[in-house]
Amino acid sequence: MEHKDADAASTAGDSCTTDSLEERLKVASLNAERNRDTQFPAVFDYVEPPKTNAADIRPYLKTPEDEERALTADYSNRPSLSQSSSSHAPPTSGFFEHSPSDAMMDRKLRQNKPRLLLMGQRRSGKSSITSVVFHKMPPQETLFLESTTQIQKDSMRSFMDFQVWDFPGQLDYFDPTFDTTEIFSEIGALVWVIDAQDDYSDSLNRLTTTILNLQTTFPHINVEVFIHKIDSLNEEFRSDIYQDIVQRVGDELSDAGYINPNVSYHLTSIYDYSIFEAFSKVIQKLIPQLDTLENLLNILVNSCGMAKAYLFDIWSKIYVASDTRPIDMEVYEMCSDYIDVIVDITDIYGYDRTHGKVLGEQMQEAESSVTIHDGTMIYLKEMNQYLCLVTVIKNDEAKDKKGLIDYNCHIFQDALNAVFARAWEKDKPSEDGEEEEGQKPGKTPAQGQLEAQLEN
Amino acid sequence: MDTRKRKKKVLLMGKSGSGKSSMRSIIFSNYVAKDVRRLGATIDVEHSHAKFMGNLTLNLWDCGGQDAFMDSYLNAQRENVFSDAQVLIYVFDIESRSVDQDLETYSQVIKALKEYSPTAHVFCLIHKMDLVQTEHRERIYEERCKLIAARSEGLSLETFASSIWDQTLYKAWAGIVHKMIPNLVVIERFLQAFAKQLSAEEIVLFERSTFLTVTNVVTEYGEDNPHPDRHERISNIFKTYKHTVARNTRTTAASAGFILFKVQTQRFNCFLARFTDNTYIYVVIPPGEAAFNCAVLNTLMARDAFAKKTGVEG
């Protein structure tokens, strides 16, 4: 029994061994594999890096709302800042110094405020234009502007005050309930904005209706058509659109019997300087002394060997006048950006000194010049609180005679102030019934002086 | 001095996407901030050179930050990358979601650096600070600095908060450059004496192509300036205008430059002129026409004296 058991055990053992030969091989191979795994676990394992007590900054990151708030805060502050700095007290920067005659000229000019009306279809870019030109908003941020629901009034305070009215596109201002006389009575120019990237038939229809409506009551209004958003169109397409619009508006108007309309066209985009250029043109038409200014600038440019001269409004960077040579966009850009440089630098260093150290005499007005790598010189001189003269000098001989240029610019400044002062004096005789002529004799002595310079 | 020694090896490292190449392009390659969107990922190491003050040349190693590259710097290329480095600039992305992992990589880099160049300076830039709300910036920055300092193994360390969208980037890099100029003390002593001679409020030296502040001296007249960040702002102003000039004269931003820039106002006068081949000098002096013109002439004449006194040629 025991034996049997033993036998059984042995057979069992035998069978076990016979089994196990295969089985053991399997087990062994399994084991080997498992061993291999257990020996090198580190290769495949992710080791948690040691924990630090770094605080999660996510709750403190800016949200889109924050950005928006910062934006609105920024831009709602800006215009008021500019108003306070240019309207009443002398600006803090110290760049601009008042003289009593400035203040007087100011007050007089302030009395008539030409009005610029911005109109056009909704989403054609009217508010973007005002934000960029008058509020210094970076163009790429105008994407986030809300659509305008009521008339937005901005004023540009400079040597002359302008009001800029931004109309909502959906408004019908010839509705009988609207007081058209009130809106259009003081108007200086009507700026009609057309989105060149969109179908503009509707806009053209409304434009011609508006022009025809206005023509009966206010025939002297300048109509300026801004063919806007041209930045993404190529050169050829631009001129096609320009031709098309000019043609269609002209046809419509002449069909209605309105020949020689007072309409001009500009190609504009907020992404480059064309919008400033166009606004400059619009505003120049509203300046009664423009011819005189251009004449003066021509004389200055010729006598000083300058390549180009601009009279800029410092704050808005719109140019009030330039000499009559063809405008070079490149030069314009350098001049207009140069104003930024000077304004920024004076902002940093124009603080009130406690030491009051002065090393000698110096003229009142700010003056600056830069010579760039190719030898071109850009010369800037402050004319009065609002205006500065920016010129480009390429003539080598002229650059050496800086004293003479300084002197000439000074004469120009006197002439400029005389021109505007005449505008102020002109008011008085007109009250007495006399008119117009006051301006002309005023400019001749100044011009005479300049011409004398030319001969020297 | 042999030329090899003058070249300073600068390692620029940090996690992928933290903004290393962006800031390098803005500072050294005349990019403007919005252009950096065009940049792709850096593959392995990109080398570039920047010359300062004639005898200081930076040999910049912009090390791509993807994990695979990082791994190879720390293992296969360890000696090649970390030996002979004078400066390590390590960029932290404040917005990063894995701070612990970042710090761990940083400490590995520091270990490698300590092994091969134990005398190197370490500058940590906590970057993209513009993404943090203004009121929390300082506190978060302080916290991060502490964490970084704890992992820096006793190497000399300086930290800066930076963003490509404002002047903090210039501040950080100007600080870095300032640290590396060899004969800074001599230069500063010279400028100090010169400022006194001109009765200037302030004199600043800018590097020509990058417009980074090399050094500056302020006299008693200029002490009360309320703008501590003015040098960075000036760098920014000039650099922006340089771009305008380049665009409109059909040259590259690298070759555009100013010969002489002058501003005269009621409260102050200042000018910027070429000084040595690689620097601009910027002088602010109190008003006074005659004194100002003299100062301009004197500065142009001081070039030679400067080169002789400080041994900075070019």
Image (tube, grey):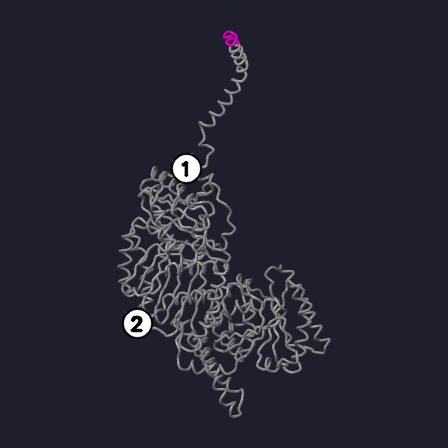
Q: Is residue A4 magenta?
A: yes
Instruction: Give the main secondary structure of the magenta stretch.
Output: helix
Residue placed at 35% from the left, 54% from the top? B214
| Coordinates of residue A156 in the picture (x, y in percent) | 50, 74
Q: Which residues are magenta?
A: A1-7
Marking on residue B169: none
- In terms of depth relative to the viewer, which is nearer, B42 or B272? B42
| Coordinates of residue A454 in the picture (x, y in percent) | 46, 75
Please determine whether, in this image, residue A295 is positioned above or below residue B179. below
| Coordinates of residue B267 in the picture (x, y in percent) | 34, 70
Q: Chain of mark 1?
A: B
Q: Identity of the amino acid at label 2?
A: Gly
| Position of the C terminus of chain A by quadrant | bottom left
Mark 2 is surrounded, within 10 Å at the Cα level, by few (under 14), some (14 to 19) or many (20 or more) other residues, namely few
Q: Which residue is mark 1?
A: B74
Q: Identity of the amino acid at label 1?
A: Leu
Can the viewer see residue B277 in this picture?
no
Q: Secondary structure at mark 1?
A: helix
Q: Is residue B136 magenta?
A: no
Mark 1 is surrounded, within 10 Å at the Cα level, by few (under 14), some (14 to 19) or many (20 or more) other residues, namely some
| Coordinates of residue A275 in the picture (x, y in percent) | 55, 67
Left or right: residue B51 compared with residue A227? left
Q: Secondary structure at mark 2?
A: loop
Residue placed at 27% from the left, 64% from the top? B220
Q: Chain of mark 2?
A: A
Q: Which residue is mark 2?
A: A360
Q: Residue furthest bottom?
A: A432
Q: Nearer the viewer, mark 1 or mark 2?
A: 1
